[in-house]
Image (spheres, rainbow, N blue to C red):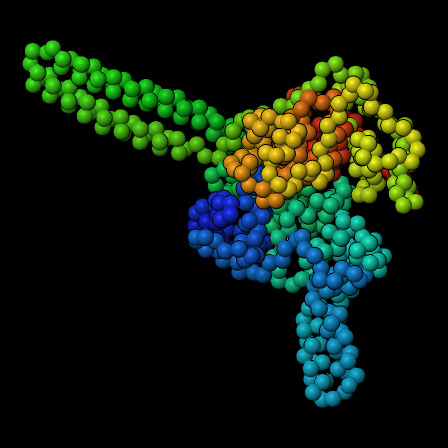
Amino acid sequence: MATINLNQLSFEYDAPYVKIFEDLSLRIDTGWKTALIGRNGRGKTTLLNLLQKKISPTAGWLDVSIPTSYFPFIPENEYQNTLDVIRDCIAPFNLWEKAMGALWQDGHPNDVQKAAEINEHYEQFGGYEINARIEKEMAAIGLAADTLERNFTKLSGGEQTRALIIALFLRKGQFLLLDEPTNHLDMDGREALARYLFRKPGFLLVSHDRSFLDICTDHVIAINRKDVRVMRGNYSEWKRQNDLEEKSERRANEKLKREISHLEAAAGQRRAGAHQKEKEKIGAYDKGFVGHRAAKQMKRAIIMEKKIQENIEEKKELFKNLEKERQLKFGSADKTPEILLTVENLSIKFDGKMIIKDFSLSVGKGRRIAIIGGNGVGKTTLFNAISRETPIHSGTVHVPGNVKLMRAYQKPLWASGHLRPHLQMEKIDETRFRQILGVMGVSGDVFDRPLETFSQGQLKKVDLCRSFIHPAHLLLWDEPVNYVDVMSREQIEEAILVFKPNLLFTEHDKYFIDRIATDVVRLEPAEV
């Protein structure tokens, strides 16, 4: 297999200035099924852009010895049937077929020669068996054969995702860079895609879905605070190893802290002793002797203190990748009633189409209820009805008058402008908001740059922070961890298990649901 090599590579953005990589050396075997993980903003998408040569390193070099294909992408012509979209994404089969047909029909010797040349390309890219190969891949990825006859724009986001990934794998001699391909997939779609990827050759995959990564990857590249590390195994194997390393590193760091403390105390004692000798010169009979001895001791103290300080700085450099142990905290409202929300026989229509039909639900104190279901069954519509953002066709939604709801949206509420005006408008304390964001790995100049420069994961964290910074009786979270990095997901899970907020949420991350939900409710399609 080919390899991708990065040697002492550095990269930084200019406006605003952000240093992403410094002296990064890395080898990626294109035969690996590799997960690329790390905190939001650490440089995962930047690395993919470097590998595509969309951007250039500011120092060092990289050698990408194989062509790359990137997902997500937009097909050149979406407004045709799905089969033709997939074919066009692999190679210009449709164009070649039309050209050959016209040239053969004309029959001129020069045209016949041109047709033969086109046919050679057509055969080289597998044009005569491409339809059969596409149908086979459709079955493998869990899409019905008749999907190929439908207009591509009429497919769901999850169906489009899987169709385009099929096209990429049918390209010849390409190394795939998959950037969060699960974003539009429900749980069934994610599992189908994971099983499909497991049977495929190498790729580099950015995803924060731990169950998904466990199924389809065999290597992990982790972008840490201070370095980038490669490990063989899937996500769970990496997590076990990383936890062991962190535990060992915490013990080593505690030892280093004690050593630094002792060194600092020793430096202080030597300086104090030297100052005492200086004082002894005052009133002493033999000024020359005492002064000479005091000067020598002061000089030795300064030299020793310098050595100790160098030792301290050297030891401080040993603090490497250990993330700061800070815990998220949820606000809690007083006097929480036993029943927070009641939905009875709810039905909602849009443009004459029934989206939700006769749905009932009760949310009690201490419950964390996951609403699951396929794409398009109305999960977000349900949340809109609960928060009075969409009209109800029939049935009732009752929230007691003293119950305060706080919502986090699938598409973050704040996505433009600067953070500070948004906080001021909602009367949110800036210092506390900054602290919570910092716990989730969003720090630095976040109040000085526009939200448009934030990553999708950073915007989601801002929205989550906005939702739980104020005390609330019930949190409504619509796909809360979509785009959010694995480490932050685990922090959120830990905080939920500790503070036990009342929670109604939708999510396609099976790991997240299994860990925090007290109840799971499936929302079925209203029309079958």
Whether residue 148 appears in this view of the structure is: no
Q: Residue placed at 56% from the left, 53% from the top? A: 49
Q: Position of residue 147 (x, y in %)?
A: 83, 56
Q: Is residue 16 above or below residue 103?
A: above
- Where 277 sits versus 73, above or below? above
Residue 14: in sight, yes or no? yes
Q: Where 13 sits versus 436, above or below?
A: below
Indicate left or right for 32 with 257 as reference: right
Residue drawn 41% across and 33% down?
318
- Quadrant of the image for the N terminus? bottom right
Residue at 77% in and 28% down: 504
Q: Is residue 388 left or right of residue 50?
A: right
Camera-side residue: 382 or 16? 16
Foreground pick, 438 / 523: 438
Numbered circles on residues, count: 0
The residue most toward the bottom is 109
Q: In the rendering, at what x and y percent does residue 6 appear?
A: 48, 52
Quadrant in the picture for residue 218? top right
Asked if 257 appears above or below 63 in the picture, the reply is above
- Report whether 503 appears left or right of 432: right
Quadrant location of the C terminus in the rendered image? top right
